[in-house]
Image: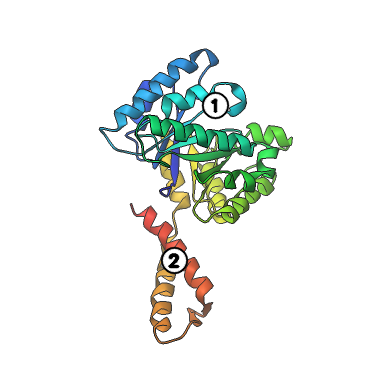
Amino acid sequence: MKPVRVALFVPGINSKVMSKALAAAVDAVILDLEDSVPIASKADARKLVAGAIDGSLAHPGPMNWVRVNGASTGYLADDLAAVVRPGLAAVMLPKAESVEDVQQTAAAIERHEKTHGMNPGTVEIILQIESALGIYRAFDLIKASPRVAATCLGGARDGDLQTDLGCSWSIEGTELMYARSKLLLDTRAASSYVLPLDGVFSDLNDEAGLISDTRLSARLGYVGRTTIHPKQTAPVRQAYAVPEADAAYYRKVVSEFEAKEKQGVAAITVDGKLVDYAMFQRAKRVLALADLDQR
């Protein structure tokens, strides 16, 4: 999956909002068929989302993701039949808890890709982890299918994960720290190619809180997050951005290490700090993120 800093949720029942979002300065747009769509409007939303995906083919912009309804709802099969089509980059599977559900979702996607003449593996899966069981099983869920390209923590205030755990919520993040850290660890342990994405910050009027929470997210190792309004885009990008001082140091690390390596040396000091292959690899990873912030 392409690197992601900001993925914007939009209701799949509002064609005007979807159209605006697909031209927004975000990395991905999540056309939502789940929580933002009333039950009575699910069928209409599928048609609108399919139309939005078709329309985006003529005007390439952010990646198109669709959050479908969960496997236990009875709506998933119809959702996948409607939205797996050219132009779709990924399906977000909410409340992911079962390896079988992930595998069955992957199999259904494969069938619909064939129907539409798409290359196998075109549509990836993002696992939205928002329950205690999902956190507990995260590693196995990620390994369930090679289509899994990202995980996303459902850690919003008063959301499913907080409710399931029965914990409080604070801007310091103490109460959800274990869940947040475990999902990140399992994601990285399962595959270096799977993106760890953080979930939404639900208070639209608390920009300072959004920035603080996103900086914590970045320190933990998350590379991006989902958002619920375009006004959150700039603060989120700012908070995830690699500080220029850090980027300058790591550029120096790469330059000096590569020069010494050619001389047969693999352990040096840069600005008084030890640098060997481990630190060299860390430097290259940070610089890859810094390059993303410049796009």
> Looking at the image, which residue sits at the far left?
58
Q: Is residue 109 above or below residue 184?
A: above
In the image, 211 versus 70, the foreground residue is: 70
Q: Residue at x 41, y 43 (%)?
A: 234
The numbered mark, 2 or 1, whose residue comes first in the sequence reads 1
In the image, 175: left or right of 58? right
Label 2 with label 1: CB-CB less than 8 Å? no
Q: Which residue is mark 1?
A: 69
Q: Residue at x 66, y 48 (%)?
A: 177
Residue 218: x, y in percent? Answer: 53, 53
Q: Is residue 73 above or below residue 90?
A: above
Q: Which residue is mark 2?
A: 284
Callout 2 environment at 10 Å: few (<14), some (14 to 19), or many (20+)? some
Q: CA distance from mark 2 to mark 1?
A: 38 Å
In the image, 92: left or right of 139? left
Residue 211: x, y in percent? Answer: 51, 46
Callout 1 environment at 10 Å: few (<14), some (14 to 19), or many (20+)? many
Tag 2: amino acid = Lys
Tag 1: amino acid = Asn
Residue 62: x, y in percent? Answer: 35, 39
> Looking at the image, which residue sits at the far right?
166
Res 122 visible: yes
Q: Is residue 85 above or below residue 289?
A: above
In the image, 97 versus 280, the foreground residue is: 97
Label 1 element class? loop
In the image, 194: left or right of 262? right
Badge number at residue 29: none
Residue 182: x, y in percent? Answer: 65, 50
> Looking at the image, which residue sits at the far bottom?
263
- Displayed quadrant of residue 58: top left
